[in-house]
Amino acid sequence: MKCNYRIIGTLMATLWNIQAIENKPNIIIIYTDDQGYGDAGCYNPESRFLTPNIDRLASEGILFTDGHSSDTVCTPSRYGLLTGRYSWRTELKRGVFSAERKCLIPNERMTIASLLKSQGYQTAMVGKWHLGMDFPGDIKKRDWTKPVLDMPLDKGFDFFWGIPASMNYGVLAWFNGRYAAVPPTLYTSKKPNRFAISDYRIMPPYKNVFSGQNKLEIAADFIDSECLTRFTDQAIEWIQSKSTETRKGNPFFLYLPYTAPHKPVIPIERFRGRSKAGAYGDFMMETDWHIGRLLKTLDEENLSENTMVFFSSDNGPERTWAKRIELYGHRSAGGFKEGKRSIYEGGHRVPFILRWPAQVQSGRTWNHPVCQTDLLATLAEMLEIPLPPNAGEDSISFYPVLKGNRNNPQRQPMIHHSANGRFAIRHGSWKLIMETTRNPRELYDLDTDPGESKNLLDKYSQKAAELEKQITRIVRTGRTSTGSAVDNDTPPWQDLTWMKN
């Protein structure tokens, strides 16, 4: 009897996929900071720098071409990613947090980390938090022998190593859990950066006296250019420490939010001058190299096959994107309009890639809208866990896509939100940008006009009216997902200008 190796191979692959689900996959979220849609070769063939490791993730997984952050700046996007809920439903209506304040995520709210921890995952965060922490004492009278509270270890993470917020906000130290080995007892201010456009440095010398100028609290051993190396080193060390347990069937979850390419743009020496897009391109090449170090560790530990790696960015590129076009011909936002903070596509359409060799066919592209808020529901469906009514209110699972569904089940409408509080709704190819007291309403068909250059409001007023009803419903009912209405954390606020009452 002749052996049919194709049938045997198919059966073995099917059995492996079943086993992969039973043996829950490890999960890694790599989250870059201010990386635009066009800041990776897999999205931008005309990029002025190379990103081979990000491109590898895309070629070995699914590249989503219409993926979005839930907001256009750091804090609200991180809230949306971890909770599956839009941050404008909370007290945070505009902008970002400083390092020190009550955490935007209350302890009782489900996060990706707490969901996975409840299912036996070992959970860790390494990198930049930027959702608020409770430090001991006030800025002029700290007691660093006491623990930091209301931070990642209270939100579902077993392990935390990182910094509290962006580097332009104090407090800056290498925190391991609730304590810093070298406490931030010195003070500094931003210093000129000779490497990059319109930028700054956080580097010695530091002062031992607080003043109006020196108001960033900092540890003596903190230097801005060490963040990417230290974060990646710690992430690799943690994975290696868990690999034996993982092979026994105890999966891990690692959340790795990097600080690049957010300012300060400070590539290490080995990458300076290597790109054709100045220091920013060099910095992106360094970031990509660190991602490669992480992927190499997974390969060496024989963990790659059943590890889901999700890669994305918290928002579009910083305003220096315009100068990069002028000086280098590099378009950080790809072909999209504007960048960070903006309600237009360049502000929230971001790299969005998922690799999971055990389950996801390589080399696929998905061209339909998805949002970072969707990750919570996707993981819950994968683990066959129903979300409670007060969790993941704006999370819509795309797990069928990972399983190979090539149909286009149209996602529920997606809400975009800018740093200054402006709203937009996206459904199918249509995007309605809501009016403010200073700006009129705008309507675009992104299939025919991805650059948002032709306002179709007058021509398609009925479509705009339909979208207005949808965004009003989503705001008022407290959720995008199906289920009973829930409350937002505040009453209606001034940015909801189109809602009459």
Image (cartoon, rainbow, N blue to C red):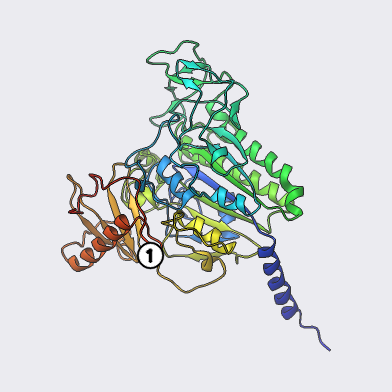
Camera sees residue 299: yes
Q: Count every numbered label the image shows and give the total.
A: 1
105 is higher (above) or lower (below) than 193: below
Label 1: state its secondary structure.
loop
Residue at 48% across, 63% down: 397
Q: Which quarter of the rendered picture does the N terminus lie within?
A: bottom right
Q: Amino acid at mark 1?
A: Gln
371 is higher (above) or lower (below) than 159: below
Q: Residues within 10 Å of mark 1 (few under 14, many from 20)?
A: some
Q: Position of residue 240 (x, y in %)?
A: 72, 43
Farthest residue toward the right? 1
Compare residues 262 and 413 and report the one nearer the observer.
413
Farthest residue toward the top? 209
Q: Position of residue 273 (x, y in %)?
A: 52, 35
Left or right of 459, for residue 273:
right
Q: Which residue is mark 1?
A: 412
34 is higher (above) or lower (below) than 189: below
Compare residues 172 and 480 and report the one nearer the observer.
480
Q: Position of residue 375 (x, y in %)?
A: 50, 56
Residue at 46% across, 25% down: 170
Farthest residue toward the bottom? 1
Q: Position of residue 313 (x, y in %)?
A: 47, 47
Residue at 60% across, 61% down: 383
Compare residues 222 and 81 and report the one nearer the observer.
81
Left or right of 364, for residue 140:
left
Camera sees residue 451: no
